[in-house]
Amino acid sequence: MHKDVKKVLVSQEAIIARCEELGKQISDEYRKIESTPLLVALLKGSVPFLAELVKHIDLDIQFDFMDVSSYEGTESIGDIRVDKDLDCSVKGIDILLVEDIVDTGRTLLEVTKLLKNKGARDVKVVSLLDKPDRRVVDIKADYVGFEVPNEFVVGFGLDFDQKYRNLPYVGVLKDEVYQ
Ligand code: XMP
C-alpha cells in the first residue's frame, strides 16, 4: 500500500471483477436494443476505469474523450466549460458516458444536457464510484461500480492535486497529507 494511504476502500481485484460484470451487463443490454454505444470518457479521472471496462465489453464500440471543468473552485457548480471537445459528431448516436465518480451530480447533469443538445439520441452513464450522500441534483448513473461513503477518495484515476491517479485501488489518504 502507498505510504500516504490510510485505508483501501475498493481493492484492485474487486474493481476488475466488477468491470467484468458491468461489461457483460452493458453488452447484453445494448445488444438487446441493437445498438452500439459510443463511450465518452471524461478526462482525466475516468481513463483507468475506461481501460479496464472496455476489455469486458463484447460489442464493436468506439471511444472518445471530453475534458470539462466547472467554472469555480474545487466544488463543482452549475455551468461547465468544455476544455476538450469530442473528435466525432454525436448526432443520432447512443452515448455511454464514462465517469470516475458521481459526487454532487452536477457535472453529469451538465454534460448529459450538452450531449443531448448536440443531437445524441440517448445518453446513459457508467461510473466507477457513486457518492450518493453528496448528491444535490436529481441524476443517477445507469451503471455503478461501487457506492462509497462521503469521504475524499483517490486512486484508479482519482487524484489529490493530480497525484495518486495511478494507484491500482481506491483508497483514503492519511490526514497529514492534506496539511
Ligand atoms: P460532481 O460533483 O459534479 O463532480 O458530481 C464529479 C467530479 O468531482 C471530482 N470528485 C472527486 N475527485 N475524489 C476525487 O479525486 C473524490 O472523492 C471526488 N469527489 C468528486 C471528480 O473529478 C468527479 O469527476
Image (spheres, rainbow, N blue to C red):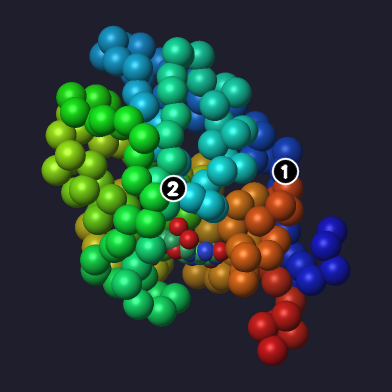
On the rendered structure, is 174 left or right of 131?
Answer: right
Q: Residue flagged by tag 2: what amino acid is it?
A: Leu
Residue located farthest toward the bottom when viewing the structure as drawn: 179
The answer to which of 70 and 133 lies nearer the viewer is 70
The residue depicted at 72 percent of the width and 43 percent of the height is 12
**Quarter assignment of residue 69:** bottom left
Q: Can you identify the residue that label 2 sits on?
A: 42
The residue depicted at 47 percent of the width and 54 percent of the height is 101
Residue 135, placed above or below residue 88: below
**Quarter assignment of residue 102:** bottom left
Mark number, residue 12: 1
The answer to which of 159 and 86 lies nearer the viewer is 86
Residue 85, placed above or below residue 63: below
How packed mark 2 is, by other alpha carbons closer than 10 Å (few <14, some 14-19, many 20 or more), is: many
x%, y% of residue 107?
A: 33, 58
Q: Is residue 139 visible?
A: no
Q: Residue flagged by tag 1: what amino acid is it?
A: Gln
The answer to which of 7 and 169 lies nearer the viewer is 169
Q: CA distance from mark 1 to mark 2?
A: 21 Å
Q: Is mark 1 within 8 Å of ligand 1?
A: no
Q: Is mark 2 within 8 Å of ligand 1?
A: yes
Q: Are marks 1 and 2 in contact (CB under 8 Å)?
A: no
Q: Quadrant of the C terminus?
A: bottom right
